[in-house]
Amino acid sequence: MVSQKDSGYRKNFSLIVTFIGLISVVFILSLFLAFNFSKKNIENDFVSAKANVLEESIKPYNDFFLNKLPEISFYNGYLDSASASKFTDTILMQYPFVSRVTFYDTEVKNERYEDHGINLGDFAIGMKNVYQFGKSVHKDSVRLFGQNEAVKGAGLEDFNPVTLKLINFIQKLDTTKVPTQEDLFSNFTDIRHNRIDYFNIPSFEILKVYKRMISTKLETEPVYQQDMLSFELDPNKIRIKNTRPLLYQNIRIEPITYDPIDTTSEYITGEITLGGPFSDYKLYFTSSRDFVKKEIFSFFWPIAALLLLFYGVLVLVAFLIYRNLNINHKMFKLQYDFVTNLTHEFKTPVSVIKIAGNNIKSATSLSEKEQKLYGKILDEEADKLNGLMNKLLAFTQIENKAITLNKDSVTIEDFIESSLDAYALKYPDFEVSYEVSGFKTFITDPVLLGSLFDNLAENAYKYSAVNNKKLHITARMIKDRVVLRFRDEGIGIPSSEINNIFKKFYRIQNRYNQNGSVGLGLAFCKELVNFMNGEISVKSVVDKGTEFKIVLPYNN
């Protein structure tokens, strides 16, 4: 006999717990590492993302410097106060960081200036008129200088540096080679602290004339128009574009020398120089640690969710493995019990048949009474074996849909009466009653219906006390369905076992099941009902009785 101890499907609970414990430790460690990774990543972002904020914030300045300034050269030096006013109005409106524009209407001559100009050889460049434009400039202060007027405000101190740079470029100019646009732009532009001065760029042919004018007095004594615009810039008017509002709590423009007095560890700070005419200023970034921590967690939670999902999958796999091992263990136990009980069921009649056969063989002669007794014993035990074999065969056939459903008209009262007669012969102490209402006949398979009645009656008799073996059968028509109820007054079924009683090979552990129950009866009933396109359910109260309810189609 196979021992339950030898089961290949033992529950290894400690192994599953160890596995779950191990992956839990790995999960917690992964969360810790993921948080540190998130923290490091956000801290690195705090440093690296400053460049992006700077780039976005100074985009208007770059547009002004690279695109708007060169437009001055389109006028070829012929800007006047009116056109300069319109041009600067556009700049002041479009670029808020430009606070004031000074327009120098200048000319280049081949004769020396006595004042308000710079001379190199016979090359001279000087101011004709000077105007200033800006929101803070009063109308009376627009014109600063005229050739026939005294200087009111701006003079040579702003004009001279960029003019000297221009003259130096012309003096070194190689007239055999056209200078690049970058070279021209850098020499006709002067960038200083919060200020950009720009001369319009003449053609290369004019530049060559400028070169000759330095060393030669030209006969034509040409005069060329040049325009210079000086832009005063206010770095505090730069519109800061915080591209990472969840990372940088506050961004402001500070002098490059700015050093905060409060250096507590509650805040994270950073800085980046503006550059160009704003090189004396910087963007200063501050965020409280709690503020940055929110961004850390916003980066961390998706990673944590993925880790949790992976952990959940591993736990689910562990659970499924454990459940399958548990199910296999239960199936092994059921099969073990089935083999044990089936062996007992077969062993008893086989033993009786063998004893009867030995008695017949060893007896010298048998009386008529003994012959009838042994014949009855052999016949009854053979019927037991045949019934058990037939039940196993029928169960297998129905479960595998190997038989077909026969449809015959059954007269319900005659059918129940014939069943009662069989119960009376088999179990004289079995008290069975019935009640029929609502119909007389219906279409079904009488053989399968008989097996259903026999199994439920067997159960009612087996699981009732010796002095209280009763069964009441009712058959009613309810909404075109035949409803059969089998009500006994037996020991009942515990509520915890209700969901198990229809399982194959399952036996409820009680005093009535100690000897010879294979665990196929109710499972066979359920398969029969399902095969007949019906439903079966049960209600039971311990020590009060059990009622099986079967619902079958009226015309199947």
Image: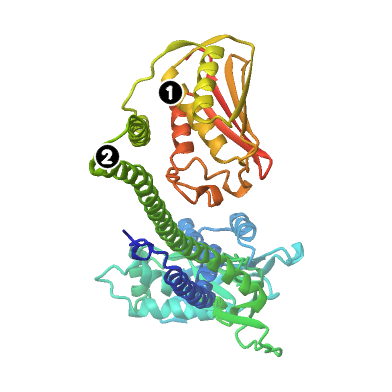
> Which circle's residue, 2 or 1, is located before the other in the chain?
2
| Residue appearing at x 54%, y 30% in the figure | 536
Label 2, secondary structure: give it. helix
State which quadrant residue 253 falls in: bottom right
Residue placed most toward the observer, 358 or 301: 358
What is the CA distance from the residue labelled 2 to the residue labelled 1?
38 Å
Q: Is residue 132 above or below residue 266?
A: above
**Quadrant the N terminus occupies:** bottom left
Question: Is residue 318 at all visible to an observer of this figure?
Answer: yes
Residue placed most toward the observer, 196 or 83: 196
Q: Position of residue 343 (x, y in %)?
A: 34, 48
Label 2, on which residue? 360
Q: Position of residue 341 (x, y in %)?
A: 40, 49
| Residue appearing at x 48%, y 58% in the figure | 71
Query: Relative to residue 487, is residue 310 drawn left or right?
Result: left
Label 1, on which residue? 448
State which quadrant residue 399 falls in: top left
Q: Position of residue 286 (x, y in %)?
A: 64, 78
Query: Relative to residue 387, is residue 517 drawn left or right?
Result: right
Query: Relative to residue 150, is residue 324 drawn left or right?
Result: left
Q: Is residue 216 above or below residue 338?
A: below
Tell me the amino acid under the disc marked 1.
Leu
What is the number of the mark on residue 390? Answer: none
Circles 2 and 1 in contact, beta carbons < 8 Å: no
Q: Position of residue 123 (x, y in %)?
A: 42, 76
| Residue appearing at x 31%, y 69% in the figure | 179
State which quadrant residue 98 falls in: bottom right
> Local crowd at mark 2 within 10 Å, few (<14), some, or many (≥20)?
some
